[in-house]
Image: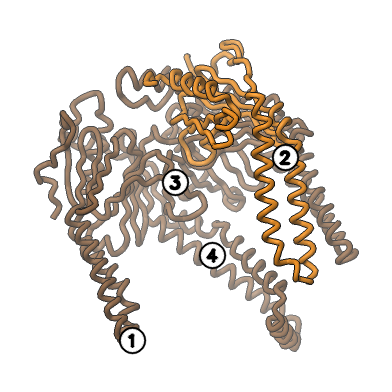
Amino acid sequence: MTTSSEPPVPLPAAAPPPVLLAGHLHPGVLFLRFVDGVQRAVLPLVLGLAVERWFLALAAVLFVSQMSYGLVRYLTFQFVLTTEELITREGILNRQERRIPIDRIQDLGFESTLLRRLFGLVVVSVETASGSGKEALLDSLGRWEAERLREALLAVRSSRGTASAAAAVQLPPMADEIRLFAATTGELLLRGITDLRIGALLLTALAMLQFANEVPVVELRLLLGKFLQWLQSFPPAVLVALAAGLVLLVLGTGLIAAVAGNLVMFHGFVLGLRGEVLQRRYGLLTTRSKALPLRRVQRVVIEQSWLRRLLGYATVRVDSAGGSMDQSNDSKGGWDVVVPLCERARAEALLPVLLPHLAWDGAIWHAVSPRVVLRLFLKGALLVSLLLAAGLPALGAPALLATVLLPAAFAIGWLTWRNVAWAEVPGQLLLQWGWLGRYRAFVPVRKVQSVIVRAGPVERLLGLATVTVYVAGGSPTALGDLPYADALALQSQLATAAAQSARADWTCRRRADVPAPAAPMA
Amino acid sequence: MTDPYSGPPPAAERPAPALERLAPRVVPYWYLSDLLGTIVLAALLFGGTLWLRERTEWWAPVLRWGALGLVAASLVWTLVSPPLAFVRWAFAVDDELLQMRYGIVFHEERVVPVRRMQHVDLVRGPLERLFGLATLVVFTAGNEGSAFRVPGLLAARAAALRDRILRARGDDVL
């Protein structure tokens, strides 16, 4: 029963802000908990029937505890949206109440697994800009109710300080959605095919073979020796074919996994803009939908890994505060992807939407210091000398092969110098990096949290430094190998501009009690 | 256009604040705390290598000498680093920016706009209290690298700095 018409819960505050929406979890949750309970109980149940009777009791306890937890949560969980905050309450003995000021709500994310979709359920995650990302999880609401919650939230936020928020909620949806991008199956296929994890998979397989070779397990060696002897009984042509087949198999598996993974994850990807809010919907099995207010955008990155750069394709990622806690794992389910894959020109055409007031046509790109070539060459030379020192006594002359790395280091240095660049346009810092691929970050200066200049011993020797720009979301953006004085000048300029816009934000917020505008005031 | 980015260079508009040094007594404090750290490290490594005595494999002496080398290196660093760190450390606070400069091997210059700070902490460990010192820690929004520490401040100075930052931020609740 989605009881949004239920009488509002009284608030303890002296003058309680008007309640806009209140509700409970969807009853379908009980079935989900039932499935969970069965899942938990199935192993002890089998053990109980097959091995020992008392496992049955364990199964019953697990099942009942899961079910009663689900039931209690269903019966007690309650959410209330007022014009000021979103409140969730749950628990009988341990009553827990969480209040999230609406201003701090960064995003409402919707996620729906296959099972939940059967019941029309969605998990609503409330994200704030705090470091931990997800602040509250409403597991699960009916789709219709979740949509209503989002509508109400967006309406309240956009009408703060202007009109009565309660009235705004009664209004029809603010604006029609403008479709910015819809991924075709071809693009998603290409995204899978150009996924560089295939290469990583191959490398992993090689490394594992290498490791197995190194491990001083006698049996394995013997086994391997026998296997090799057995292999040597074949003609060389067959062996080559076998090896090629093996490599193809590994590559093929990786390719299929990458393609399938991308198709499933980003199936039906649609990016739209409604008013000032970006909307994304995607997913085949688990469907996701996410609203991202444009003013929360901290950084936009156009990424072209080398394969995609070769083909002229790019992906677009947006960092927003709080949401990108785990850069390394996949648990965020592509939350930061705005465009899975499209031609570079189309990706760049989206930029003015993602970053209003961005004008970078006439941007003058500055290369970093050419001494970067020397630095990377020195690094390579150091590696080579270490390899030689270790390898010559052990291997003799073949160790000299390591010197091949010297021209490679030089080439990498030269490519880096050609590729790494930065530019300043009004209100934005543009950074470009990568030596085979090309990555371009667009950082609104007003979002800058801090700027750090770092120089290690080698960098100091060459008079170089690295500038790192921190924004509130995602990983920091680093620009290496600037001449030291330039690095300091850029730092000072960025920090001063950031401080100025911070001051503008503050006075604006204090004066009108409205969120700061999306761009520096002209 | 009053665009903040293409404005006049910062130096012309606002003179850079004078850099401030840490309290000199931070040097003995660092000596003591680093020495304690080295002793703890040595004790741990000594305990760890006790069972190596019986071992005769080739790697046993390597580990033992490695542990000894580690302790020696830590000791040398303890003796050398505090004065160098003191000489390198400098910071400045004004109404707009907190600037920090430090690092012996890796030089760092950090700048944080005061209004971007989320909260300001004063931290005083037991040893720091013994020396009458405090560490100022400011946090900005964000995940990585969002904490900035200024160690080795006299307690009164640290409190004054914190109040100054809070005032500059416009929080008149002191």
- The type of residue carrying mark 3 is Asp
Q: Mark 3 lies on which chain?
A: A
- Left/right placement of residue B163 relative to residue B38 reads left
Mark 3 to mark 1 CA distance (whole Å): 49 Å
In the figure, the orange chain has which letter?
B
Mark 3 to mark 4 CA distance (whole Å): 23 Å
Whether residue A259 is situated above or below residue B163 in the rendered picture: below
Residue positioned 68% across, 70% down in the render: A211
Q: Nearer the viewer, residue B98 or A410?
A: B98
Find residue A336 and name its label.
Answer: 3
The answer to which image quadrant residue A439 occupies is: top right
Find residue B78 and name its label.
Answer: 2
Nearer the observer: mark 3 or 4; the answer is 3
Mark 1 to mark 4 CA distance (whole Å): 46 Å
Mark 2 to mark 4 CA distance (whole Å): 53 Å
Neighbours of disc 1 within 10 Å: few (<14), some (14-19), many (20+): few
Q: Could you say where residue B82 lies in the image, as x and y percent from the top left? A: 70, 33
Q: Mark 2 lies on which chain?
A: B
Q: Nearer the viewer, residue B162 or A80?
A: B162
In the figure, the brown chain has which letter?
A
Element class at badge 3: loop
Q: Which of marks 1 and 4 is nearer the N terminus?
A: 1
Q: Is residue A363 visible?
A: no
Callout 1 touching callout 4 (CB < 8 Å): no
- The type of residue carrying mark 4 is Leu
- Left/right placement of residue B8 relative to residue B47 reads left
Q: Mark 4 lies on which chain?
A: A
- Left/right placement of residue A97 relative to residue A299 reads left
